[in-house]
Image (tube, rainbow, N blue to C red):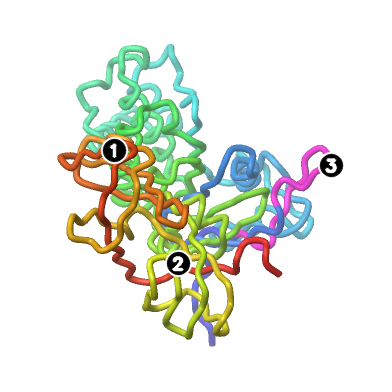
Amino acid sequence: MNTKSPNHLEISGVSVELGGSRVVDNVSFSLEDGEIGSLLGPSGCGKTTLLRAIAGFEQPSQGRIQIRGQTVSGAGQHLAPERRRIGMVFQDLALFPHLTVLGNVGFGVRQMGQDAIRRRVFELLELVGLERYADMYPHELSGGQQQRVALIRAIAPGPDLLLLDEPFSGQDLELREQLAREIREVLRQNGVTALLVTHDQLEAFAFSDLMGVINSGRLHQWDFGYNLYHWPADRFIAEFIGRGVFIQARVLDETQLHTTFGVLAGEMSVSYPAGTEVDLLLRPDDIHYDPRGHITARVESSAFRGADHLYTLVLNDGARVMCHAPSHHAHQPGGEIRIRLDLQHMVVFPRAGSA
């Protein structure tokens, strides 16, 4: 007998149409109890529409959405948003300006007695280090503090699922990643299953157990962040995640490619017959600045990033690649540097434009 419990969130073949156009196209993925996921993609790709469908604000044209084994959308069913036991954190946070932090966080549990409300609120405030701010109003808090208040307000009632729609986008880059890590830890401590929508991949990496990359309404890959980066399922993911470029190559056998760098050997993402023309993905961390390296490249441009430079380099055959180098090794555009490759595996796709 199969005793496996259902996934906490199950999305099965969901499509959503708006204004006669299919905005979400046959998407399927799942989260187990306590897992944290992200939907990542460019603006207008359909990720927020999918989140709204999970929340109950949009009705799928096909497919099924289940939370804790209960069908909330699909097969002639559509449970109202207020009956889905879902917590939400929006981009604008939507804190009540006339209520204190205590009043905001306690709003969702106001059916409890006053003593119980206070205990629950201070328990959550301590988790995010804001217990001293209980009597302050939202306008008296920093952006990061408001973010934390919005989060614990959403989880105070103990929702079955927490949905977050671009909640960090109003913060600067460094604070976004810091908040993502902190909020992930709070969700972990409370055993909350959550799904984040974002266009920022670093934010998604910091926040998620699992990530899905969406483009034009279609889910390209649902996987661990490591696999999305190192083993992308298609060219869109390879180009969207990280700062990869492609160089032309020809397959020699199951483990070797002929490239502008010479013959490269290693594990390949897909096997192709000998002689197949392919494109090889190279990321900046695959190429190392090395004064004794046997490959010479011309510096086309340089971006100073504090601890390092990100160089765009031109090879002898005109191909462009990117390379990180320690910041104390400063090279001007037009100059030459030596590099070496350090490919742990080779991600290859059919040559662009080929049959």
User: Do the numbered discs 2 and 3 sit on residues whose CB atoms are within 8 Å?
Assistant: no
Name the residue: 29% across, 47% down: 336
In the visual, does 164 lie left or right of 286? Answer: right
Q: Is residue 17 magenta?
A: yes
Q: Which residue is mark 2?
A: 231
Question: Residue 186 occupies which quadrant of the picture?
Answer: top left
Q: Is residue 302 magenta?
A: no
Question: Residue 167 occupies which quadrant of the picture?
Answer: top left
Name the residue: 35% across, 32% down: 173
Instruction: For marks 2 and 1, give the one nearer the viewer.
Output: 2
Outermost residue toward the left in this view: 328
Outermost residue toward the bottom in this view: 1
**Quadrant occupied by the C terminus:** bottom right
User: Do the numbered discs 2 and 1 sit on residues whose CB atoms are within 8 Å?
Assistant: no
Q: Amino acid at mark 1?
A: Gln
Mark 2 vs mark 3, CA separation in Å: 35 Å
Image location of residue 24, percent across then percent down: 69, 50
Q: Nearer the viewer, residue 341 or 316?
A: 316
Element at label 1: helix
The residue stretch that appears in magenta = 11-24
Q: Which residue is mark 1?
A: 178
Q: Which residue is mark 3?
A: 20
Mark 2 vs mark 1, CA separation in Å: 26 Å
